[in-house]
Image (tube, helix red, strand yellow):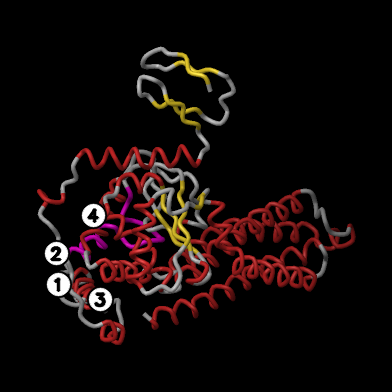
Amino acid sequence: MWEQIRSNQIRSVILVIAMGILLVAIGYAIGFYFFESAVVGLILAIILWGILNLIAFFQGDNILLAISRARKIKPEDHPRLYNVVEEMKIASGLEKMPDVYIIDDPALNAFATGRNPDRAAVAITSGLLQKLNRDELQGVIAHEIAHIKNRDVLLMALCSVLLGTIVILAFFASRFLIFGAITGGAGRSRRSSSQGGGQAQIIIMVVGLALMILAPIAAQLIYFAISRKREYLADASSALYTRYPEGLASALEKLGNSTAQLQSANQATAPMYITNPFRQKGMKASDLSSTHPPLSERIRILRAMAGGAALADYDQAYRQVHAGGKGVIAAGTMGAVGAVGLRSAEPEAVTKEPEAEHLERSREVSDLMLRMNKYRTIPCDCGTKLKLPPTYKDSIVKCPHCGRINHV
């Protein structure tokens, strides 16, 4: 995947330059109006641009994990998840095991972050961990590992931090400009204000409104600029690492059928996730998304694969779904990987999950969340385990099943 790695490095540079141009434009407007010198605004914008790039590069992953309310876990906290991440790390050839994080949210989603494979992390929601069986979980984790392997994570971290900052700056700058125009040029000297007259105020108001309107549009354009191709490549890599395309296809079906909205997501972090985290309340994930390819299309491509070389089969399936259009994987990459055997999808009668496995998985995740949230467990003589939140201050608790009084 060296071609994609190279492409993402180029895109990262372009993204940094594009963000710098936007910041310079905002700095020019602020400097011209508030300091009567565009040079002052430009200098401030350049300084801010440099600081933001340093923050995004060195601390972008920590910021994104904090915004997403993700918490790091250890192998003993959830052995099944840790084992799956370790399996996919070995299959992908990563030298270092990514850190594993859990987001306490019933929505189904996951993302990877980190500026390079040595500082990478994989985060998944508790809802996803509860709903997916092992094959499906492998498919999702392999997809996220592919983003780390292909160096997508630096691009996404830069995009999320810088783009979010641009939108915030544009929002406040536009309001200051409009406020200044309405109040007759507050922030500039009385002499400048009188010279500009009403026309200057109108121009300033127009500039302020333009910033308000263009910032969200610029956000959408950059979402499109972060090519959807990286999602297709991560899907193809997932099939290669797991040897089982049906695992990811089935997981994407469950993600698409979910109606839960991810509470910690925002427009700046949306491109990080395996599927678009936004949807109307009570509605399933839509195929219309500016940040991700249509789910139904991704599922069709994965299920169109059958034996042979994983990447070559994915590329052929992609061409079929796109009516013979240009492939998504470079010929050199397919040749370098060579042929690998894929495991065929099992019949529905075999793959249908027993209810006991689902209940066990739900209990496993529930216990993990309780431990992470520092709940205390008080065993009752009747066999009931009483779960008490850290805010519980009483010295006794009554068992709801047998009525016994238990000391805390």
Residue identified by numbered label 2: 344
- Which of marks 2 and 1 precedes in the sequence? 1
Residue neighbourhood size for the residue with mark 1, other residues' Cα within 10 Å, grouped as few (<14), some (14–19), many (≥20): some
State the residue lying farthest toward the top.
403
- Which of marks 4 and 2 precedes in the sequence? 4
Mark 1–mark 4 distance (CA, rounded to whole Å): 18 Å
Residue neighbourhood size for the residue with mark 3, other residues' Cα within 10 Å, grouped as few (<14), some (14–19), many (≥20): many
Residue at image position (24%, 58%) is: 247
Label 1 sits on what residue type? Gly
- Which of marks 4 and 1 precedes in the sequence? 4
Label 3 sits on what residue type? Leu
Residue identified by numbered label 1: 307
Q: SS for tag 1?
A: loop
Q: Nearer the viewer, mark 3 or mark 2?
A: 2
Is residue 112 shown left or right of residue 87? right
Is residue 100 shown left or right of residue 335? right
Q: SS for tag 4?
A: helix
Quarter that holds the N terminus: bottom left
Q: SS for tag 2?
A: loop
Specify start and end residues of the magenta stretch as a single range. 285-303
Mark 1–mark 2 distance (CA, rounded to whole Å): 7 Å
Residue identified by numbered label 3: 311
Label 4 sits on what residue type? Ser
Is residue 57 shown left or right of residue 402? right
Mark 3–mark 2 distance (CA, rounded to whole Å): 15 Å
Mark 3–mark 4 distance (CA, rounded to whole Å): 19 Å
Relative to 397, say whether 349 is above or below.
below
